Image (cartoon, rainbow, N blue to C red):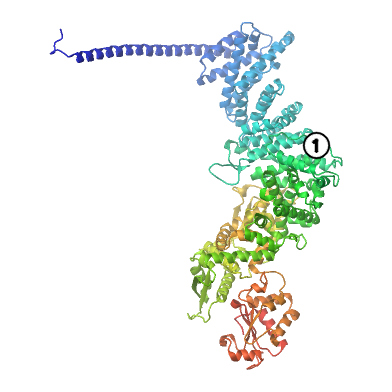
Amino acid sequence: MFSATQTSKSQFLDKARIAREERKGYKEKENSATQIQALVRRFLCRCRLQREIRKEVDDFIAVSDAGSTKRNALSIFKIARKLLFILRKDDKLRFEKLCRIILSSMDVENEPKVWYVSLALSKDLTIPWLKQIKDVLWVSCEFLKRLKPDILQDNKLVTLYLTMLITFTDTSTWKIIRGKGEALKPALNRICENIMGHLNQKGFYSVLQILLTNGLARSRPSLSKGTLTAIFTLSLRPVIAAHFSDNLLRSFLLHIMSVPAFISHLNTLTPDCMVTIQTHDLFRKFVLFLSREEQCLDICVCLEGSHTLCLLGNLIQLGYFNVKVLEQEAGHFVKDLTDMLSYSQRYVSQKKSNLTHWHPVLGWFSQTVDYGLNESMPLVTKQLQCLWGVPVICTLFCDVLSKKLETQDPTPPPPPPPNSLQNNLPVKNLFKRAFQKSASVRNILKPVGGKRVDSAEVQKVCSICVLYQTALTTLTQIRLQILTGTCFSHETIYEVYAVYRPIMHIHTSNLFSNVLSSSWKKGLYLSKTTVEILDDIEVYEEQISFKMEELVTISSFLNTFIYKMIWDGILENAKGEKLDLFHSVHGWLMVLYERDCRRRFTPEDHWLRKDLKPSLLFQELEKGKKRAQLLLQYIPHVIPHKNRVLLFRNIVTKEKETLGLVETSSASPHVTHITIRRSRMLEDGYDQLRRLPVNSIKGVIRVKFVNDLGMDEAGIDQDGVFKEFLEEIIKKVFNPALNLFKTTSGNERLYPSPTSSIHENHLQLFEFVGKMLGKAMYEGIVVDVPFASFFLSQVLGHHHSTFYSSIDELPSLDSEFYKNLTSIKRYDGDVSDLGLTLSYDEEVMGQLVCHELIPGGKTMPVTNENKISYIHLMAHFRMHTQIKEQTAAFIRGFRSIINPEWLHMFSTPEVQRLISGDNAEIDLDDLKKHTVYYGGFHSSHRVILWLWDILSSDFSPEERAMFLKFVTSCSRPPLLGFAYLKPPFSIRCVEVSDDQDTGDTLGSVLRGFFTIRKKEPGGRLPTSSTCFNLLKLPNYSKKSILRDKLRYAISMNTGFELS
């Protein structure tokens, strides 16, 4: 039937397959068309139904708006059910009108059938009605989340939806309860509780939090008194209904109490709400809830950093308003705040990184920051300030201030839970066991001055102190305010110090185990802060909080304590709390030490440890012993200054050997030769030296001077000519007339000139000057350059220390300005009356320039609230901001020669001595011992004997200093004595004037030795070569002539100039 010519078998099968696929495709298209038609019909049907329902709702609303007839509850229920069935975002106007209809039905008098709530009593409709009202209320919540209270139309809707929530979550406004309906009240109350439970499950508190944040997280609240009252009432109802259960308290704390300045706004706008808080004793309940470690940790984990601060602020302000409860629950309150601050502190960073965000109170913070709350942070900061306000401080320390500390040791408080956020229980238990086993420690713990060191009262004071310490290290951007507040009540500080004073008079080795408990560290904190924040007038003249002898006692104790911790090996293995203790005590010690360095209050050798042998220390340093390194790192001041200078010189010598800068038997150091024109010494020195590598500057530099005629000056530089060059360079650059440096008012000390920019390359010049001064120190050449101590502090990097205070250094710049500035601090009236702003006006080049201390500062008045900040900002501007670039350039140059770690062992005054020599009187015996004689002079020569007798008997100390400056160019002796003066002090007998002097000859030496004179030299003056530390002395015939000529020469400071 199938012939080969018609088709093959395979072609037939292909055709059959294609036909099947075509039929299948037609069928799928048919089905698809059917489905599409069904979907379209369904969509059109839904649209038609929605239009019909919306029309029906609109008609219902129109009739209700006309007010001709009152709608009964059942009709409202039915129309609401239809609207909820088709509700979309564009139905919000219909939903709004439906809510108004429902609320109006609740206001009708004596018509039960009209009351919407009456359906709750219908047997058939109770459950449907309950579901409907839950849906209506939740839709109201959904709309509330999207509304902005600062917009007028939205504000009206906020009021509407809040009224809905207020009405149907409490039966107090339901008219159905009046009269015989009182019997129904319990059942209706349960309905309300059911509604609130449903809302809570859906996220009711989150809605209220969003609404509160939108309305309050701003400088001026946009919520009215009624609105805020309604929100507070709604937030409190579930808590009261649940009898203050943990779950509801947790929600209230997380969502309501974490709203910025919530309590502050309540107190301002709705005082009645504050009464409600006190009536229900909410503050106590919050404190007790958070006192459980797991609850507090849960709250901290759930809240972001800004919201944690807001919660803290609200709790603190509640405590401020509830002083009685605060006093009763002080222990729990302090623990709660400490734990929350400690948790936040984990995320506080010291510097910017890719993982940190800037926070106006916390600084760099490694958690996500809600920047929307920044506008409200000033209000939160004001709340936080209550913590260090006088009322709260006095309440927390009421036992100390009222002298309630008992002599009997009461029952110790129960131990904290094992999972404390501070994790300090193991250390406490460790030392507690040690105390119980040691009789000597038990003796220490006996009452001294009326209270035991480990008593409950002392522990209470300790816990309060650590709260303020934690606040200081966590709230980094308001640290100054905390310091100001905590130290405001000097009576409080002194009484707290009195709790710990007895242990400072106990000097036993076991004491150092005793004080290794965290409580001791915490108890000393406030005293440290007081000393840190008081100015010099308050410390030295008024002696506020502490007398001088008490500061001496404290500093002696702390010095011994830190020394023992290091030298006894305790610090080497210290971890956790022990390490924290060490750093806290060391911090206080350094505050006292640095204040003593600025203005002495301790006796001579107060800081030295007589039981420490410098030779042993240096041996251990050579061997790399850890305790010796730690001692040098933390308390170098216990080592005599002379030994530290020796150590510094040894360090420099070792570096020279390492760099190959010292002459050896096998190699000579590289020598850099420079040619300097005397008339352009600074310019030539700058051009030739600034391009040299650092190691070349550290090495040997030979100088050849060229005179005004372009001729090379005679002489070979064996360090002497370079010394002269260095001295001349330094003399020129530090001359205030050049305007690179200025002098302070009063004591004429040098610091960078704020107007140095008149020099085109002033920053490069500062770097060059830094290098030259570093070179002088590197070579041990003393130069008479008195620096202002605030500038030297910056060179040493002290201004980066946590113990540094700009205001403390201000007297070294301008003592009169300092007095005027601190007088603002003591001003009893309203500082704003003075008309000051956060700016500084100065005259620059004949023009008045206004410098803003902070952005917008010239429009910000100085008030009693910000006057402390103003004082510190002004001091910081004068000493740092104005000369920031110049100082940075100088430091860059100086540190390229002198490693800053080498100077870590010196205080600011000691570095000045390192630069300019010792400020002690000249030791003539030491000078005689290390003097070299030339030209026939010798130690027993008549002229030499006259010279030493004149210096010791006829010259005053000031004239002896002038004599030393005449010969060496520096009025102060070398720190380590004249044995270390390079070149050595020399005296040479001369017969002729300097321009005829060709050096010593055999004849001149013999004539000098035998006192044979060519002619009487009475007409010539002594001269000097400061580059060689050489005094050129004619062979005078009389002592009186020598005295008169020498006195005239040094008073005229002639040097090379006159002979």
Answer yes or no: is residue 894 visible.
yes
Specify whether 832 is left or right of 661: right
Residue 416 position in % (x across, y down):
73, 35
Q: Amino acid at mark 1?
A: Pro
Query: Which residue occupies the foreground of this view, 744 or 150?
Result: 744
Quadrant in which the C terminus appears: bottom right
Residue sitting farthest toward the left: 5
Query: Which residue occupies the foreground of this view, 316 or 13?
Result: 13
Residue 202 position in % (x across, y down):
59, 21
The residue wearing badge 1 is 412
Q: Residues within 10 Å of mark 1 (few under 14, many from 20)?
A: few
Quadrant in which the N terminus appears: top left
Label 1's element?
loop
Residue 906 position in % (x across, y down):
66, 61
Residue 750 position in % (x across, y down):
63, 65
The image quarter in which residue 250 lies: top right
Query: Which residue occupies the foreground of this view, 633 or 115?
Result: 633
Does residue 436 sit above or below 993 in this rendering? Answer: above
